[in-house]
Image (tube, rainbow, N blue to C red):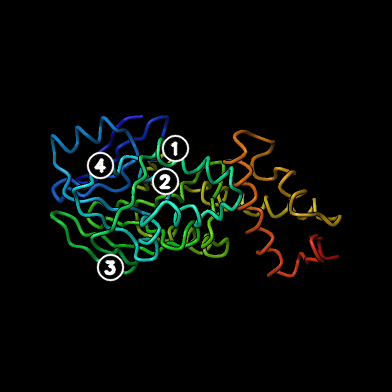
């Protein structure tokens, strides 16, 4: 992938097309703002040396958006006030993922420290939806887009008409909403909000990353992943099923994958959200430890 510039807005591609554990970064030239420093460690070091980075913003607190935050320990860090506490300690971060199983917790403890250089950070300032930030050469609208996480933010750069959507990435995998504070309903609302913004360039955190012009059918394809997960779960729930049976059906990932501490955790987290969603809609009910489709 190549780096692309849209006026003062620079798209910095992540390693391996920005696939997890990496993401694409955005740099605002002149203002020296770096958003989501998890793209390419060497490129970010060079960016700081040659052009200057004055502060770091995070679209949200997921580990694949802060992998190289340790390179900028001395700089101001801005993040949503709803997620600032998540960076206060590793224990708080693990609780956010609802990791209760001790061996899984040990896996993630090591993974976060070694792969993502996780260390506690205290934000310097909070970003909030509705904020308008006037930087050198560009006006930034901060847009609250909860669902993926409660404090997820998108950024619309007015003058070049560029929208950075963060983890609403329009990938074939579909949306993620597996954290304690995530929501399927809010995810759908946020995607529909982003569709309406008057952008000419759409930037995302993973894979394709740059869409010049309206992504068109990809919006519906992305949302339809949610509906397809619902459909497959309802088919499976024709018979009463335990949570373990539901996780073992691998509706999200398609098959059992390793390491379980990563994939089983994700499968369980997303299925919990779908069960909650379908019960709110009156399509599923719970009887003791089993879930079943309403007839």
User: Residue 261: image x %, image y %?
Assistant: 59, 41
Which comes before the other along the chain, label 3 or label 4? 4
1 and 2 marks in contact (CB < 8 Å): yes
Which comes before the other along the chain, label 1 or label 2? 1
Q: CA distance from mark 1 to mark 4?
A: 21 Å
Label 2: which residue? 63
Q: Quadrant of the N terminus?
A: top left
4 and 2 marks in contact (CB < 8 Å): no
- Identify the residue at horizontal 74%, vertical 44% (top origin): 249
- Identify the residue at horizontal 39%, vertical 43% (top origin): 211
- Identify the residue at horizontal 46%, vertical 46% (top origin): 169
Task: Tell me the mark number nearer the camera, choosing from 3 and 1.
Answer: 1
Q: Depth check: give the residue in front, 243 or 229.
A: 243
* Callout 4: SS: strand
Task: Tell me the mark number nearer the camera, choosing from 3 and 2.
Answer: 2
Which comes before the other along the chain, label 4 or label 2? 4
* Callout 2: SS: helix
Label 3: which residue? 131
Q: Depth check: give the residue in front, 257 or 39.
A: 257
Label 1: which residue? 21
Task: Answer few, some or many: residues within 10 Å of disc 2's Cα (few below 14, many 20 plus, some between 14 and 19).
Answer: many
Q: CA distance from mark 3 to mark 4?
A: 21 Å
């Amino acid at each position: 992938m190549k780096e692309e510039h849209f006026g003062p807005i620079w798209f910095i591609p992540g390693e391996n097309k920005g696939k997890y554990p990496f993401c694409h970064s955005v740099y605002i030239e002149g203002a020296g703002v770096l958003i989501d420093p998890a793209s390419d460690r060497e490129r970010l070091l060079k960016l700081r040396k040659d052009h200057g980075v004055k502060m770091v913003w995070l679209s949200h607190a997921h580990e694949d958006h802060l992998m190289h935050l340790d390179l900028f320990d001395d700089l101001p860090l801005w993040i949503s006030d709803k997620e600032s506490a998540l960076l206060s300690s590793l224990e708080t971060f693990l609780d956010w993922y609802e990791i209760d199983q001790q061996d899984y917790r040990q896996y993630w403890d090591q993974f976060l420290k070694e792969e993502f250089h996780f260390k506690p950070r205290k934000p310097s300032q909070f970003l909030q939806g509705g904020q308008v930030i006037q930087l050198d050469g560009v006006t930034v609208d901060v847009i609250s887009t909860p669902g993926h996480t409660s404090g997820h933010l998108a950024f619309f750069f007015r003058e070049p008409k560029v929208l950075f959507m963060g983890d609403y990435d329009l990938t074939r995998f579909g949306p993620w909403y597996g954290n304690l504070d995530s929501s399927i309903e809010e995810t759908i609302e946020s995607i529909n909000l982003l569709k309406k913004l008057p952008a000419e360039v759409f930037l995302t955190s993973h894979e394709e990353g740059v869409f010049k012009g309206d992504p068109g059918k990809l919006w519906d394809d992305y949302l339809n992943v949610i509906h397809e997960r619902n459909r497959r779960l309802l088919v499976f729930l024709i018979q009463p099923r335990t949570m373990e049976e539901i996780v073992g059906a691998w509706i999200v990932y398609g098959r059992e994958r390793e390491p379980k501490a990563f994939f089983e955790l994700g499968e369980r987290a997303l299925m919990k959200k779908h069960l909650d969603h379908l019960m709110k809609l009156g399509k599923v009910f719970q009887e003791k430890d089993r879930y079943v489709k309403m007839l």
